[in-house]
Amino acid sequence: MVLKYLFKATYLDGTNYQQNPEDISCQDPKRSCFFDLKSDLIKTFCLEGDGHSYLVDLTDGHFEIDGTSFCFHEHPLTEIKLIYFRRHTHNFNLQFGEQSHTMCFRFGWQAEENGKQIQRIMEIN
């Protein structure tokens, strides 16, 4: 399986973790690269590929698409946590023996805003 987008996490100390194209964890070869992330130390999480970059900043909750910044919230956030997953869709046509596979990349955050838990997730096909 070739991934259309690979992630890069930048930690609070400025170091980076880059997902490898095989998506195999450095710590456990039976797991994905996401297993290697120190999620509580991530400053930014970026998906890159197909000539574009999509970023979420976990210090303030803003998103960026190709460097253009925007927000999906109005008030300061606390306890910001990364959300990231891939949704796979498989379609089968039994009559003709055809099948297709699509993958949707979803990422964003969960946080507290004015005492309430909220989530904002960007979806990239």
Image (cartoon, rainbow, N blue to C red):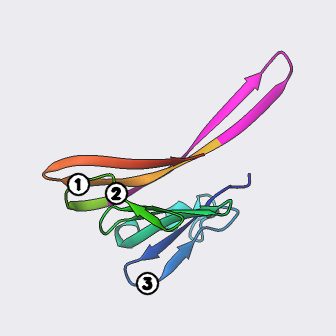
Q: CA distance from mark 2 to mark 1?
A: 8 Å
Please identify the quarter of the rendering in which residue 13 is found: bottom left
> Mark 2 or mark 3, which is nearer the start of the sequence?
3
Residue located 58% across and 65% down the image = 28
At label 3, counting other C-alpha atoms closer than 10 Å, the crowd grade (few under 14, some 14-19, many 20 or more) is: few
Q: 30 or 71: which is nearer to us?
A: 71
Q: Residues within 10 Å of mark 1 (few under 14, many from 20)?
A: few
Q: Which mark is residue 71?
A: 2
Give the answer, above or below, for where 66 lies relative to 41.
above
Check disc 3 and report its element: helix, strand or loop: loop
Is-magenta flag for residue 47? no
**Badge nearest the viewer, 1 or 3:** 1
Q: What residue is at 32 percent from the left and 47 percent from the top?
A: 119
Amino acid bearing label 2: Cys
Disc 3 from disc 2: Cα separation:
23 Å
Question: What secondary structure is the magenta-colored segment mainly?
Answer: strand
Q: Which residue is mark 3?
A: 14
Q: Residue at x 58, y 58 (%)?
A: 31
Q: Nearer the viewer, residue 72 or 38?
A: 72
Above or below for 59 versus 74: below
**Among the two numbered marks 1 and 3 on one chain, the one whose residue lies closer to the N terminus:** 3
Q: Which residue is mark 1?
A: 74
Label 2–label 1 contact, CB within 8 A: yes
Residue kind at label 1, given as amino acid type: Glu
Q: In whole angstroms, how far apart are the C-alphas of marks 1 and 3?
A: 27 Å
Splitting the image into 4 quarters, where does residue 97 fall? top right
Q: Is residue 124 left or right of residue 107?
A: right
Kindly identify which numbered label has been placed on residue 40: none
Question: Given the current orientation, which residue lies at the most extreme right position?
Answer: 96
Residue at 78% x, 21% y is 93
Q: Which residues are magenta?
A: 81-102
